[in-house]
Image: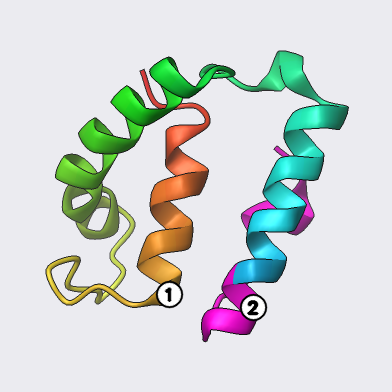
Amino acid sequence: MTEQISNFKVADRKSFVEFMQLLRSDLLANPDTWKNRNLDDFSEAMARYADDIQGYYDNMRQPIDADKANWQVFADIFKGSSIYE
């Protein structure tokens, strides 16, 4: 995953759409860096990562409540799903 995607801030629906386009481009350009490249693996990882994301925020000392989802939380779930085991 590129640094641009890792540091991309999502604040609203428009920036989420831009993020998703960047994420797709990254998959097409760098498939070897993705752990979950097909829909079955990705959706399974997405469900697990969505369940575990509060632990990520807590470990990174980010004051985010994942139960109050916003566009950035959705983007973080997609990012994490690309590499989550």
Q: How is the image coloured?
A: rainbow
Above or below: residue 11 compared with residue 83:
below
* Contact, mark 1 vs mark 2 (Cβ under 8 Å): yes
Residue 14: say if magenta: yes
**Residue marked by disc 1:** 71
Q: Is residue 75 left or right of residue 17?
A: left
Q: Is residue 75 left or right of residue 54?
A: right
Residue neighbourhood size for the residue with mark 2, other residues' Cα within 10 Å, grouped as few (<14), some (14–19), many (≥20): some
Q: Which residue is at a point 78% across and 38% down the rendered structure image?
A: 26
Mark 1 or mark 2, earlier in chain: 2
x and y, in percent, of residue 15 in the image: 64, 78
x and y, in percent, of residue 1 in the image: 70, 37
Residue 12: say if magenta: yes
Quadrant housing residue 73:
bottom left
Above or below: residue 11 compared with residue 27:
below
- Range drawn in magenta: 1-16
Asked if residue 66 shows in the view, the reply is: yes
Disc sitting over residue 48 in the figure: none
Residue neighbourhood size for the residue with mark 1, other residues' Cα within 10 Å, grouped as few (<14), some (14–19), many (≥20): some
Q: Amino acid at mark 2?
A: Ser
Q: Amino acid at mark 1?
A: Trp
In the foreground, 48 or 21 = 21
Q: Which residue is at a point 41% across and 16% down the rendered structure image?
A: 41
**Residue marked by disc 2:** 15
* The furthest residue to the front: 39
